[in-house]
Image (cartoon, rainbow, N blue to C red):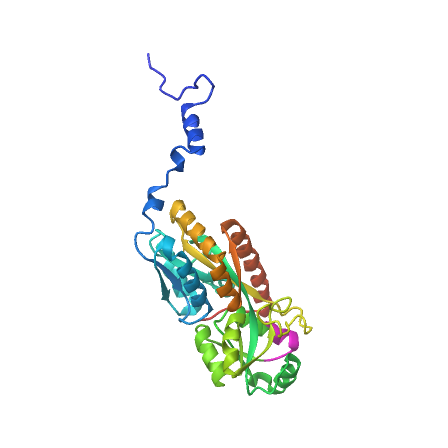
Amino acid sequence: MIKDLSPQPGPSGILRRDLLARMAAVGGFAALPSAHAQSFPSKPIKVLIGVPAGGTQDILTRAIADAVRSSLGPIIIDNRAGAAGRIAAEAVKNAEPDGHTLLLGPASVMAMFPSAYAKLNYDPVKDFAPIVNAASFELAMCVHKDVPANTLAEFVTWAKTQGNKLSFASYGAGTPSHFLGEMLNRAAGLQMLHISYKGSTPARQDVMGGNIPVYFDTVGGAISMLPTGRVKVLATSGAKRSPPMPGTPSFAELGYKDVVASAWFAYFAPAKTPPAVLEKLRTEFAKAVNSREVRQQLLINGMYPVGDGPEAFLKTQRDDTARWAKIMKATNFVASD
């Protein structure tokens, strides 16, 4: 006779394994931290940023690094500039999925590039696990001090006399900075030519130095340049005036209702990072973003704290991917670098 060794219902009709599961749910075995979470981090965490040092992404990450130092240890910032941020994304995609190598992924790299490039060596959704959507931001139109215009209307009038001899800078092809310039071209009937830079720092240096007359920067970047007296800010890209720059009108306010753009900075780990490690990172990064110190630092630098977890962020990412795809189709844009 063969004895049935399969689980049998107990007196209450609950299988033993179900009973164990219920015990865990009320503070039993599942309450114990996983081995991954207990040992993490076992070395300094590295955050890769796809632009040169000194920009808005550095400011954000340094603020968060200071806030999580007591819980996660030191965070190393690794500026992997090049290919408009794609080099950094590919490096994190291929990193060991143990939570020690993270990506600061801007909207351009993680929502716009799938439509901008015919081929990407990473998938923004499949190859990464989102940690937190840390901050959102708007952009600003900056012109060199010698540009003969103090308002957007004056600039449009002057720019039309320049034809295609006038250029504008962006902090990367296929980024919100790039497409804000293209939106203004379409809306105002201008012919400005696009010059792509490798990040915001060199573009700021050139607009302040007069090497490029127009640059579409983040609001935070614009704020950082104003004290030099070398640039003027003519408009911002939100639906309403930007709180950090209340004295500057928005494009929409000035009649260009289609010239509206905002973006975000989110943190990612490689796909297949252990869930317990992701949860620890999400908890600590969210605490940091919502802390008074970090919020103040972000607001001073033209960013808005967000703190969304993976579910809310993935919806934002999907929506923005679709929105920017329509804009790129309308402008017939295909990145070539």
Q: Residue at x 54, y 51 (%)?
A: 312
In depth, the one of 262 and 286 nearer the eye is 286
Question: Residue at coordinates 58% horizontally, 73% vertically from top-left?
Answer: 182
Against 277, is 7 above or below?
above
- Give percent across and percent down for residue 163: 60, 84
Q: Magenta stretch: give its range.
A: 183-191
Q: Residue furthest right?
A: 255
Residue 65: where, in percent of width, then height? 40, 60
**Which residue is more in the foreground, 146 or 116?**
146
Q: Quadrant of residue 33?
A: top left
Which residue, as the protein is rendered here, is positioned at the far front?
292
Image coordinates of residue 305 in percent, x first then y, are 52, 60
| Up/down of 262 relative to 152, above or below | above
Q: Magenta segment: does it hold 330? A: no
Between 179 and 294, the residue placed more toward the observer is 294
Residue 46 relative to residue 120: left or right: left
> Would residue 132 be seen by someone viewing this image from the given angle?
yes
Q: Quadrant of the N terminus?
A: top left
Q: Is residue 187 magenta?
A: yes
Q: Is residue 118 left or right of residue 150?
A: left
Quadrant where the C terminus sits is bottom left
Q: Residue furthest left?
A: 43
Viewer-side residue, 335 vs 264 = 264
The total number of labels drawn is 0
Residue 259 point in image, percent of width and height? 62, 70
The part of the image, by quadrant, that contains residue 252 is: bottom right
Q: Is residue 222 above or below residue 93?
A: below
- Taken as a whole, is the magenta stretch helix, strand or loop? helix
Q: Is residue 175 visible?
A: no
